[in-house]
Structures are given as C-alpha cells and as structure tokens.
Image (tube, helix red, strand yellow):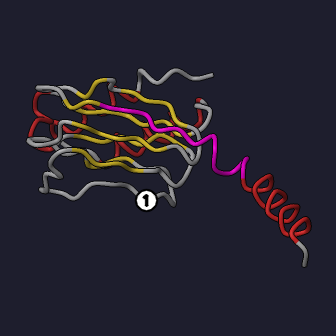
Amino acid sequence: MNNTNIFTLLLAVLAYMLPYSSFAAEVAVNAEARVFNPAIVYLQPGDTVKWSNMTSHNAVTYVVPDGATGWGEHGQLPGGSFSATPDKEGVYGYACEPHVGFGMVGVVVVGTPTQEMVDAAKTKADAELQGPFRRLLGTINKVEVK
C-alpha cells in the first residue's frame, strides 16, 4: 500500500468514527450542602454525568429503567468527584444517602423524556421506595416531558 492509500484509508476510518465519538457531552452536577445542583439533568445516550464536591456525599441510584445499570455504592462516599454514563434511555432516580432526609435527591433523564418514561419511573419508585427515599417521587414529577 502506498502512502496515498494509507492516508485515504485513515481518513475514511476517522470519518466513520466521528459521529460516534465527537458529540458525547459531559453534564456537571454539584453536590451542595443538602441539594444536587441541578436536581434534574437531561442527557442523550452516550453522554456522561459528573458529580463534584462529593467528599461528604454519594449519589446512589434507587430507580433505574428496566434492564439498565445504576451507579454508586450503598454506604460508600466516592470523595472528590465521580462520573457515570447511563446505559439505557429512561429516568434514573438517585439519592445522597447521608442527606436523603433533607431531600437531597436527583434525577437523570436519558433520551427524549416521554410520559411513558416518567410513568414507569413513578410506578417503580412508588412500589419500591420507602421512608425518605420516596422524596424521589417529587423530583420525578418535575421531569419535563416533550
């Protein structure tokens, strides 16, 4: 293969990979004293959410779409910051376990939010959450459906 063919092949590979790699975004969530700011974030598939200021906080999923994987370890503080890239479209509800009693909960919406997504998350939260973790229902109710 001569240099021109190698260069052409390299450009073709890069052009093929560009749509899959260059448009992923990182959305920031700051853990403040007793709230996540913002409390609701909207992502597209492949995007990442990054929590910062996590020295005395965690962010553990309690509501995940069917077949999806959550994030965070129960009872563990990640320290500093950590990131997650949700693996399926839907509504993910999470809480800071040390501060859930103060209402420190948040929601990550992956994909275009539909009423069906929100209803599925509310049904799951209503059936599975107890005590202060039920505060996730109020935040899920604030998801903007398109």
Q: Which residue is label 1 attached to?
A: 69
For the N terminus, give its image quadrant: bottom right
Q: Nearer the viewer, residue 74 or 85?
A: 85
Q: Looking at the image, which residue is at 86% across and 69% down?
A: 3
Magenta includes 103?
no
85 lies above or below 126: below
Magenta includes 25?
yes
- Residue 96 placed where, x, y %? 18, 40
- Residue 145 placed where, x, y %? 57, 23
Left or right position of 96 against 39: left
Left or right position of 42 against 58: right
- Could you tell me the amino acid type at mark 1? Thr
Circle 1 — which element?
loop
For the C terminus, give its image quadrant: top right
134 lies above or below 15: above
Mark 1 crowd level (few <14, some 14–19, many ≥20, 10 Å Cα): some
- Residue 120 placed where, x, y %? 50, 41
Identify the magenta region: 18-29
